[in-house]
Amino acid sequence: MSLLMRQANVAITWDFRDRLQERYPRVFEEPRFARLLQEMLFPVWRDDLTRHAVLSREVLAQLEYPDQPLRDAYVAQRFLDDFLEHSGVNAEFTEANWLAGRARTGVVKMPIDLDVAMTIEMEKEISQAYSLVDFVTGRKVPKKQGDVYARASRDARQAYEPEPGPNASWIRLLNCTPPHVFRQFEAYLSQAQDVALTIQRAERQGANLRTLHVLRLLGLVPTYQSVARTPRIYTYGQSMAHLSSNVRAVLLTGCEHLDLAAAQLAIIGKLWTLPTVNELLAQSLEDGTSVWQPLLDLVGLEAKDKGMFKRLVYSTAFGMSRTRLRREAPEWFGAERVERVFASPLVQELLDGRDRRAMRLRSEGGIVDAFGGRHLLAERRVARNKSPVSSLLAHEAQSYELQLMAPALDLTGREAEFRMVLWLHDGCYVRITQPERVERYVGRVQAAVDRRARQLGFATKLERETLM
């Protein structure tokens, strides 16, 4: 079973839906258009970089024909063209670029008055919303509808069978986390919303507010799924994983946040044999400092550029071509600094190291992942315009990421007092039910992860933050 039940339609106030219907009457005459508009405003799957809705062929087919299986002849572009021509909505769709690791996305450009109305709508306490209606159908939503959906979601979550692979047993484990584990965090939803309102970037603020709105309606319990061609464990639908870290930190007050230091950098540093990177990582571990500032110094960037530089590193790790990196870089660093960044010995080492690893992958015919699984280049099936070599390089790195973090999952399975609240690839949020045992459990996980990192030769460690 590779596809979970689709997330329920979002509930909004009658007043807000009436404003949307007045502005976009054709949308609500055609349910497929209403479902697509809902998807762009409340995405089930967000693009990691833009935070816009990911609109894959499968997603669009399900929005257009929710009761039918995906047909080979289905043309997603025809649906998007119909929406642009007839809906009256000002929407922007970007085409997928698999070589650059970019999915097709969609975003709505709403007029200012509707944008303000949307923000006001998302600020409302659900208990004060006197009349909630289904976004798509306009039918009144019973007060107990959230409970009905929560039960259906729980049943689907527990019945879900992930694709065979090293992550399958852990996905089953995570999907069996009892709902009562998350109830204490519902009390922090309003505080999380207050933090979201302080976010300066309007688009990011709106995305956080919409996610919190859905979480209020449908609950905080995440559902986990396997995804093709990666060992990573992903949440399905709207979840706490979609929140900005500062908003999530308030929502999960009382949790321990465990995070691998510069995880992807440490992993590719070893797998791609990057001497400067490895030296700086080892020094940062010894000094107990962050590796990012020394790296920024080497490429002539400032502390404020850290986020953009990390984007360069991760885009390289996940296969973005040199040409595409240079094309994207002016947006990240400013056109005047691009040549200096790419001419730096550090960035050259990173790109050359990837090229050497890719060349060896081709000569060996594939990879062996961290769990001993053999993945052949000749058998790697990827989307049109996507590189199977890049796909395998990313798979290799992500398998070691999971291997490093596995002790946290194993402890979740062994100890009922150690609860996994949210899984985030190279980090997680956990709750220990007995306060006097927090140090013991956190110490056990940190020691196990750090020991595994040393054994595998990765210059990283598990860092810990107590959310107060």
Image: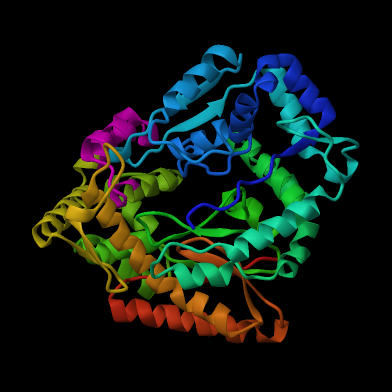
Residue 175 percent across, percent down from the top left: 59, 66
Magenta stretch mostly in which secondary structure? Answer: helix
Please state, as top left, top right, bottom left or bottom right, where the C terminus lies in the image. bottom right
Residue at 51% over, 75% down? 409
Residue found at x 15% / y 51%: 355
Does 40 appear above or below 357? above
* Colour scheme: rainbow
Task: Give the percent coordinates (x, y) of residue 38.
Answer: 64, 32
- The verdict on residue 325 being magenta is yes
What x and y, as percent, mark residue 2?
47, 55
Quarter of the figure with residue 428? bottom right
Residue 280: image quadrant is: bottom left
Report which quarter residue 10 is drawn in: top right
- Viewer-closest of 124 and 135: 135
Residue positioned 45% across, 75% down in the render: 406
Total marks in image: 0
Question: Can I make out residue 201 in this image?
Answer: no
- Picture coordinates of residue 440 (x, y %)? 59, 87
Q: Which residues are magenta?
A: 315-341
The reply to whether residue 50 is in sight is yes
Q: Is residue 15 left or right of residue 407?
A: right
**Residue at point 39%, 73% (across, down):** 404
Q: Residue furthest left?
A: 363
Q: Nearer the viewer, residue 129 or 209?
A: 129
Q: Is residue 62 one of those drawn in magenta?
A: no
From this view, report whether residue 222 is shown above or below residue 46. Answer: below
